Amino acid sequence: MVIIDARLAARLWDSPRAAVGQRLIALGEDSEVIGVVAAIPCGSILDERPTFYLPQMRMARWNVTTVVRADRGLALDGSIRHLIDEIDPTLSASAVRPLESYVGSAIAGQRLAAEVMSGFAVAAFALACLGLYGVLSYSVALRRREMAIRLACGARPTAILGLVLREGLRMVLAGIAVGILGALVAGHLLGGLLVDVAPADGPTFTGVSIVFAAIAALACLAPAYRSVSTDPATILRTD
């Protein structure tokens, strides 16, 4: 008898329902498939190898891994060892650990890589924000003479601020659109490295876009506001 996972069933017989009752060679013995279980990672959270399960008596090893459901905060070590002693005093539990501990060990490498990549991502995001603010504020500052002439000709300060903001945001929004397309392509290529995270993560894209748009608005309005708040004659004389 053998139990297989859904991944192996789909590979050999196209569907879990068709696999039940079939026969396969498991560890050198002809075995009948008596059930199909959900596929789970083995050894690594990214492991997608098909798996089968045999009766313990057919296994060469005599160590058994048992999963126990318990309430959080319960002293598992002492309780489980006491329960094993009641069942068979000759048995011993070599390691009693919460499932979170096993999962943490299994994904330690991926977690370290994710933390390093997150650090680089935060640094890149901060540099992008600083660069965006610096370039936009400098480009707006170069237009002080133009804004002074517009003010001298009777333009309203609010109209000038709106003009500067629209022109700045138009460029930034175009850049955001190109960046989102690039992120979608990169997410599709790196999708195999993601666990429980969609490559097209809408909240992340939305949040980053809002931050960039807010920084662009601030970079445009701050120097423009200083220019429209200054006497046009002063700007024309100094520039």
Image (cartoon, rainbow, N blue to C red):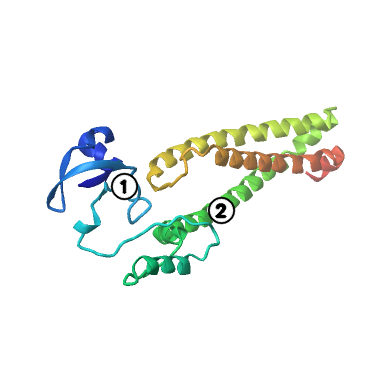
Q: Is residue 86 above or below residue 164?
A: below
**Residue 154's x, y, as percent?**
85, 27
Residue 5 lies in what quarter of the image?
top left
Q: Is residue 39 left or right of residue 125?
A: left
Disc 2 marks a residue whose amino acid type is Val
Q: Is residue 90 left or right of residue 239?
A: left
**Residue 237's x, y, as percent?**
83, 43
Mark 2 crowd level (few <14, some 14–19, many ≥20, 10 Å Cα):
few
Q: In this rendering, which labeled residue sits more in front, label 2 or label 1?
A: 1
**Residue 197's x, y, as percent?**
47, 44
Q: Is residue 202 above or below residue 124?
A: above
Label 2 and label 1: CA atoms lie apart by 31 Å
- For this orientation, the residue located farthest to the front is 86
> Depth check: 218 or 195 in front?
195
**Residue 189's x, y, as percent?**
38, 41
Q: Is residue 142 at least partly visible in the picture?
A: no
Residue at the spot 21% in from the left edge and 42% down from the top edge:
33
Q: Quadrant of the C terminus?
A: top right
Q: For mark 2, what is the residue?
A: 122
Disc 1 marks a residue whose amino acid type is Glu
> Depth check: 85 or 12 in front?
85
> Depth check: 192 or 14 in front?
14
Q: Is residue 49 at least partly visible in the picture?
A: yes
Q: Is residue 53 above or below residue 227?
A: below
Q: Is residue 21 left or right of residue 212?
A: left
Residue at the spot 34% in from the left edge and 71% down from the top edge:
89
Q: For mark 1, what is the residue?
A: 48
Secondary element under disc 1, as helix, strand or loop, is loop
Q: Is residue 19 above or below residue 66?
A: above
Residue at the spot 20% in from the left edge and 62% down from the top edge:
60
Mark 1 crowd level (few <14, some 14–19, many ≥20, 10 Å Cα):
few
Q: Is residue 201 left or right of residue 212?
A: left
